[in-house]
Amino acid sequence: VTAAPPRALLFDVFGTLVDWRGGMTRAGEQAGRRLGVDADWAAVADSWRARYQPALDTVRRGERPWVVLDVLHREALDAVLDEHGLGDRVPPAERDELTRGWHRLDPWPDVPAAMRRLRAAFPVAPNSTAHMALIVELSRRAGLTWDAVGGAELARAYKPDPETYLRSAAALGAAPAETMMVAAHNGDLLAAAECGLRTAFVARPAEHGPAQATDREAAEGVELAVGDLVELAERLGA
Amino acid sequence: VTAAPPRALLFDVFGTLVDWRGGMTRAGEQAGRRLGVDADWAAVADSWRARYQPALDTVRRGERPWVVLDVLHREALDAVLDEHGLGDRVPPAERDELTRGWHRLDPWPDVPAAMRRLRAAFPVAPNSTAHMALIVELSRRAGLTWDAVGGAELARAYKPDPETYLRSAAALGAAPAETMMVAAHNGDLLAAAECGLRTAFVARPAEHGPAQATDREAAEGVELAVGDLVELAERLGA
């Protein structure tokens, strides 16, 4: 970074810090063994994630009040299981358990140590569509430590609503221009930049599996692009 | 505790975890030395704190919108300095610096180690009238680590508004009855109990100085009373 380092860092979580596809594939496989059901659980995870933005959109458009992500995940799962011909094979209690799988995702290998290093140098907060209870459970399990939890529940809105960026930065005591949003998704970063935040792209080219076509590199207008969080820590002098 | 341990813990901050009177006396003495002003800075700290609940009441009664505590502290300071005959001795920049003193309070001696022990066993969050940026700065300085930051900024209301208790518990993924509020103030605890939370009183008999008359022991209706957080950790099996 040629400019001065930021004063605070915000992080996207799903895909940027944790491997949702691997974690939800594993959660599906565990359910499948309990139920004696054979399925392509990676494909189920992909279908589930594909329903994520459309579900958020119903809140963004004001068609329903803000709800915690568990509710949207659980609703979408019913349609996903039908889509994969599993609608009569997975009982409600297992659907609840599968939904809780989103609380138990593993961090990418570079994340835990690099986050400790970054947090020693900067106040850090997640700015995720996930609600706080999901972040708390996931972070305790993954050994991630935050100074505050920003994001959807604080703003009662989902990214890219400007309040998610602005209130998350304020929670860390930093002005937007002093705050850097870190994400593996260009759309998130460009929305942050529109709110006056600084931006860092971290490459997660296997987030969506081996054939990922999107977000393989930083878009124009993103300040910094790194291969992982260790490189981010180095670039920021952490 | 005869009942099962709680699933999550919420903490009051000023007075319960940190020594605001000692910290603000020190901040005043430092300002006094810079300005060549001699004053009874402990008395100034007491006057400042005495204006705290009346200032919060203007928000509680809906006479003004919710604001971060820095704003209320800074406004009250003007009246406090006049009251102590210091109105023309402390320039605006020093008043801002004094106000920032509330971000730099030291924990009581039992707190850092006991909080690490409690956090190893339970998700923990502050439920304070302080805004998140104050909590973040104070906690980083004091070595306190949280799973989430509840309280006034999350609820956009001040205790004893029920939303402060309910939204802070939800942030930790716990139902009210699974959550224990920890405070040195009976009023805070009885309000938490009305929201269905469990309660623990921690004695801070010198919070207001040597002649403290209030909150010397737990009120009737408080579940648990301890002498410090080490005793709380022991009683909760942490």
Image: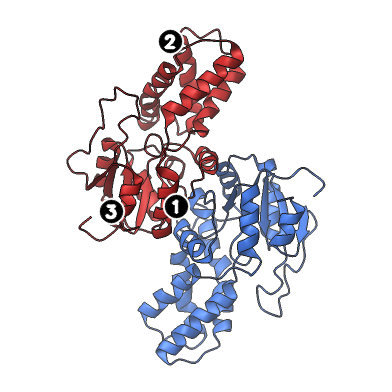
Chain colours: A red, B blue
* Whether residue B114 can be seen here: yes
Q: Do labels 3 and 2 share a chain?
A: yes
Q: Distance between the residues labelled 3 and 1?
A: 15 Å
Question: Residue B14: x percent and y percent?
Answer: 59, 65
Q: Residues within 10 Å of mark 3 (few under 14, many from 20)?
A: some
Q: In which quarter of the image is residue B33?
A: bottom left
The subunit letter for the residue under badge 1 reads A
Viewer-nearest of discs 3 and 2: 3
Q: Do labels 1 and 2 share a chain?
A: yes
Q: Distance between the residues labelled 1 and 2?
A: 41 Å
Asked which secondary structure carries label 1, the reply is: helix
Residue A83 numbered tag? 2
Position of residue A48 relative to residue B76, above or below, is above
Q: Between A59 and A173, which is closer to the camera in this rendering?
A: A173
Q: What residue type is labelled 3?
A: Arg
Asked which secondary structure carries label 3, the reply is: helix
* Whether residue B75 can be seen here: no
* Residue that numbered label 3 is attached to: A235
Task: Assess whether mark 2 and mark 3 are in contact (beta carbons under 8 angstroms).
Answer: no
Question: Residue B113: x percent and y percent?
Answer: 63, 62
Viewer-nearest of discs 1 and 2: 1
The subunit letter for the residue under badge 2 reads A
* Residue that numbered label 1 is attached to: A116
Q: How far apart are marks 3 and 2 (CA)?
A: 44 Å
Q: Residue at the far left: name it.
A: A220
Q: In this view, does A10 lie to the left or right of B121?
A: left
